[in-house]
């Protein structure tokens, strides 16, 4: 009886982990799609921040657009800088 409970627990845990992985993958795809669609809208503000040092410019970008992750803000800064 105890052996069955342990196996059931392991299977349920595995299913939850797989579901979590698929949700994270979906969220990442949605964030990438949002970045691709809104990049042109965010780019003028990022270009206006190029006079600041890199770290401060990225902080300003994230403060203006809190929906951006740090990686996306850095990518936007590099696009604005033309690198």
Image: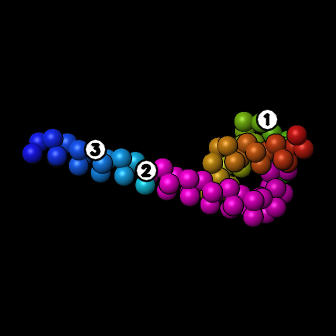
How far is disc 2 from disc 1 in space, using C-alphas?
A: 42 Å
Which badge, 3 or 1, comes first in the chain's sequence? 3
Question: Is residue 51 part of the magenta span, yes or no?
Answer: no
Furthest toward the right, the residue is 82
* Residues tagged 3 and 2 counted as in contact (Cβ below 8 A): no
Labels 3, 1: front one: 3
Left or right: 36 in relation to 44: left
Identify the magenta region.
Answer: 20-47
- The residue singled out by tag 2 in the image is 18
| Residue 12 vs residue 58, the one in the foreground | 12
Left or right: 28 in relation to 14: right
Residue 31, image x and y in percent?
63, 57
- The residue singled out by tag 3 in the image is 10
Identify which residue is drawn at 15% across, 41% down: 3
Q: Quadrant of residue 54?
A: top right
Which corner quadrant holds the N terminus? top left
Indicate which disc residue 53 carries: 1
Q: Name the magenta segment's main secondary structure.
A: helix
Residue 69, image x and y in percent?
63, 48
């Amino acid at each position: 009886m105890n052996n069955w409970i342990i196996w059931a627990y392991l299977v349920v845990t595995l299913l939850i982990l797989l579901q979590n992985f698929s949700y994270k993958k979906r969220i990442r795809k949605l964030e990438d799609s949002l970045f691709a669609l809104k990049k042109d809208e965010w780019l003028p503000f990022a270009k206006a921040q190029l006079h600041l040092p890199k770290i401060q410019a990225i902080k300003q970008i994230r403060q203006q657009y809190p929906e951006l992750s740090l990686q996306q803000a850095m990518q936007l800064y590099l696009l604005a800088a033309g690198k």
